[in-house]
Image (cartoon, helix red, strand yellow):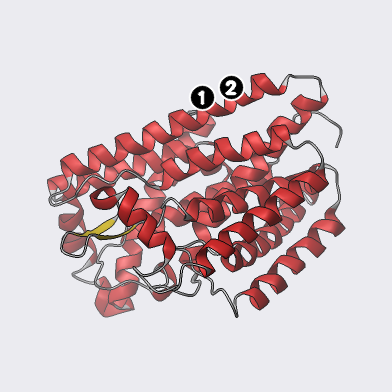
């Protein structure tokens, strides 16, 4: 693969399955009955649901490397790419805020939340792009990545506790975000925000791992990518003994563990799709990933606002499915149906060559 812009169908497919996973996790038919692997860990740990967002951030890094590196090689000025990244990141952040405003207006009892998934993507996209454009050698990027994880870990461990509300990440969010966080207790003035301030350092590390993996993939260094995946998994296991896997705080062990699995999955789909020519199932979802996520968010809000979501589940799923497959699987069936609607929509968009770029 030469220094030219290449679009890997495997990465589009991987991004598509990641977004589909987000929709599955976020749209249970009955929140009192959810399959264990569609639920996030209560605090420490890593369930399949916890892999989804770090996988997406890893893919953000992959895409950055594959989009910007060939342009730099052709002589495009870094300043132009920095401006492009800043504009796109800002659009992502503003879209995330707008979606949260919409949720606040349509869902009863929903307080406005400043941070969120798209806001986090926008912020780390810009930061990672700037690091990539300022640090042009692989060694300098590795130093930056390792230093970032070390700094984040040192801050968390020096905070005195890793327990909910007592850890440094939650304390910072309580002060800086307060009632604008995901959860806020007005009596104790304590907040919890999965996409909080300090945990952004961990999320940025996930993107930087994607950039490094993208460089190996682009330069056909597959054996090195295999070894990097194994090293991340082993390091994630070992470091998790001292600093547990934790998505809320986005600990370094969580970064290593999830990045290792993301690389392993990348190697698999790259081999199957790009090398052996298997169909890139999920690619249409992947090329309109942000549009699908935003559209699903709006649909979820409207289903809640009108009561249509509860009506559909109670009349189409609840009467018969729980007796056949159980309450949790019935709830998951609703999420699958919801996701299938957006899979069909993005497939239709792909057939018409419609692509919404944020």
Where residue 191 sits: x, y (%)?
A: 29, 59
Q: Is residue 26 above or below residue 163?
A: above
Residues under numbered marks 1 and 2 in contact, where contact means CB atoms less than 8 Å apart: yes
Q: Is residue 302 left or right of residue 129?
A: left
Image quadrant containing the N terminus: top right
- Picture residue at 70% right of the left edge, 32% below the top: 133
Q: Is residue 168 visible?
A: yes
Does residue 12 lie above or below 241 as drawn? above
State the image coordinates of residue 90 (x, y, percent, origin top left). 46, 29
> Circle 1 is placed at which residue position?
87
- Residue 275, disc: none
Identify the residue position indicated by label 2 in the image. 83
Q: Position of residue 340 (x, y in %)?
A: 41, 51
**Residue depicted at 15% across the width and 63% down the height:** 187
Helix, strand or loop under label 1: helix
Left or right of residue 328: residue 5: right
Q: Nearer the viewer, residue 29 or 110?
A: 110
Left or right: 315 as drawn, with respect to 97: left
Counting from the top left corner in percent of width and height, residue 268 is at 72, 59
- What is the number of callouts on the image? 2
Q: Is residue 249 left or right of residue 209?
A: left
Camera sees residue 352: no
Residue situated in front as seen by the camera: 211 or 266: 211
């Amino acid at each position: 693969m030469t220094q030219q812009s290449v679009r890997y169908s495997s990465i589009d497919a991987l991004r598509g399955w990641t977004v589909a996973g987000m929709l599955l996790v976020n749209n249970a038919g009955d929140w009192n009955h959810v399959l264990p692997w569609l639920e996030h860990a209560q605090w420490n740990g890593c369930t399949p649901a916890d892999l989804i967002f770090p996988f997406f951030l890893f893919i953000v890094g992959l895409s950055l490397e594959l989009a910007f590196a060939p342009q730099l090689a052709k002589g495009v000025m870094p300043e132009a790419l920095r401006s492009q990244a800043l504009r796109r990141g800002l659009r992502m952040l503003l879209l995330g805020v707008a979606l949260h405003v919409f949720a606040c207006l349509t869902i009863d009892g929903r307080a406005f939340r400043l941070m969120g998934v798209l806001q986090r993507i926008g912020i780390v996209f810009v930061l990672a792009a700037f690091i990539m454009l300022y640090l042009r050698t692989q060694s300098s990027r590795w130093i930056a990545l390792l230093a970032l994880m070390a700094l984040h870990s040192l801050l968390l461990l020096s905070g005195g506790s890793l327990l909910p509300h007592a850890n440094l990440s939650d304390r910072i969010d309580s002060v800086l975000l307060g009632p604008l966080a995901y959860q806020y207790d007005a009596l104790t003035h304590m907040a919890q925000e999965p996409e909080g301030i300090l945990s952004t350092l961990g999320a940025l590390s996930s993107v930087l791992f994607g950039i490094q993996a993208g460089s190996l993939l682009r330069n056909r260094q597959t054996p090195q990518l295999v070894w990097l995946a194994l090293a991340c998994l082993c390091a994630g296991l070992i470091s998790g003994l001292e600093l547990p896997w934790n998505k809320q705080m986005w600990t370094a062990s969580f970064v290593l563990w999830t990045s290792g699995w993301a690389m392993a999955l990348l190697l698999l789909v790259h081999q199957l799709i790009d090398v052996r020519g298997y169909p890139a199932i999920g690619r249409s979802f992947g090329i309109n990933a942000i549009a699908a996520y935003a559209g699903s968010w709006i649909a979820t809000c409207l289903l809640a606002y009108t009561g249509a979501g509860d009506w559909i589940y109670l009349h189409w799923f609840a009467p018969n499915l729980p007796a056949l497959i159980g309450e949790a699987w019935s709830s998951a069936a609703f999420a699958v149906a919801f996701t299938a609607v957006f899979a069909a929509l993005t497939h239709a968009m792909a057939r018409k060559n419609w692509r919404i770029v944020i």
